Amino acid sequence: MKSPFRVIGRVLFLLVVVTLLVIGGVLAYFTSWRSDKLAELEEGSEVVKTAWGDVEAVTRGDGPAVLVFHAAPGGYDQALILAQGVDEAGYKVIAPSRPGYLRTPLASGLLPVQQADVMVALLDTLDVGKVTLLGVAEGTPAAIEFALKYPQRVSGLVLVSPVLRRWISWKKEELPPVASGILEGLTGDVGSWIAVEKAGRDPRSLLNAMEAMTSSGTEEQHARIVDGVLANPDQLEWFRGLVGSYAPLTPRETGTRNDILQIRNLPDYPYEKIAAPTLLLYGALDPRLPADLVASVTKRIPSVEAASLPAEGAVVWLGPDGDTVRERILAFLKKTAQP
């Protein structure tokens, strides 16, 4: 008769072997995914050499130009997600990776005003004159700097969920969820890979988490948003694309950290000097955009159209009015965009 200790030992040994095989398989799958994703990102863009430095970018469509300033973390791939459908409506979408993201080195533009400079250099290299600026979240300071410094190059300014005041400390609750995770070392390539997998297999749980972090609404309001997104194939596809634009996270980390630093020192911009017609879109439940702050800024912009989406948080594309975001942007472009 075999000793029970020997049986237990063999069982434990088999469990260890199986566990190691599973871990090895998962790591191999992750490594393959990361390699494929990086190759796909590199193949989908080009690095343009400008007078101010290298800029990774891609252009889509023909017509009046729209220059996109993506959020954090992001890159040219996120810029395309944020401007989805604009090229199909008869416009040229210019989607760069801002400095510090993907293949655009941070040296090309540390400060928001320097990012504006390098984007003008990009336009010069691409032989593009006037543009409409589309700035989203952490990308809005650079878009505002562009509008202030180069008014002759701007047909219109679109600000979506803009950053309108500085983050005065490093407190987690004052930072974007993904940015705070990077700062604390809680995410990374593995974390972004898990998020992509969850967006594909279990989007409800990820949507719940995003709503909780980006909206000041109640649990009931969050549940309605999540149910609505899951029932809307276009919004669900857009959400998955957005999550995909966070991954892999490592080549986006430098830019995100820089954005956090720059917004911590954000100046009070002279909004009165913005010459271009401006569209400001924001969610009424965005915890970082209280109504009094938005009102105080919009009063200072000479030609502004501000629209609050009543049920949405910071990610205004997701919710009952989310489908109108693109429509509002296209209507604004129709009125203001110039060749």
Image (spheres, helix red, strand yellow):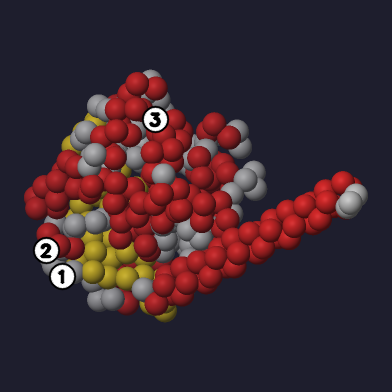
Q: Which residue is denoted by mark 3 in the rendering?
A: 215
Residue 77, position as x, y percentages in the image: 37, 62
Marking on residue 287: none
Number of other residues with Cα within 10 Å of mark 3, as a class: few under 14, some 14 to 19, many 20 or more? many
User: In this view, which residue lies farthest toward the left?
Assistant: 335
Q: Which residue is denoted by mark 2 in the rendering?
A: 90
Residue 76, position as x, y percentages in the image: 38, 63
Please state which of residues 151 and 159 is positioned toward the viewer in this rendering: 159
Q: Which residue is drawn at 65% across and 48% down?
A: 185
> Which mark is first along the chain, 3 or 2?
2
Q: Which residue is drawn at 27% across and 70% down?
A: 59
Q: Is mark 1 on a helix, strand or loop?
A: loop
Please state which of residues 241 and 279 is positioned toward the viewer in this rendering: 241
User: In this view, which residue lies farthest toward the front?
Assistant: 1
Q: What element carries label 2?
A: loop
Among the 4 quarters of the image, the one containing residue 17 = bottom right
Q: Which amino acid type corresponds to the residue marked 3 in the rendered image?
A: Ser
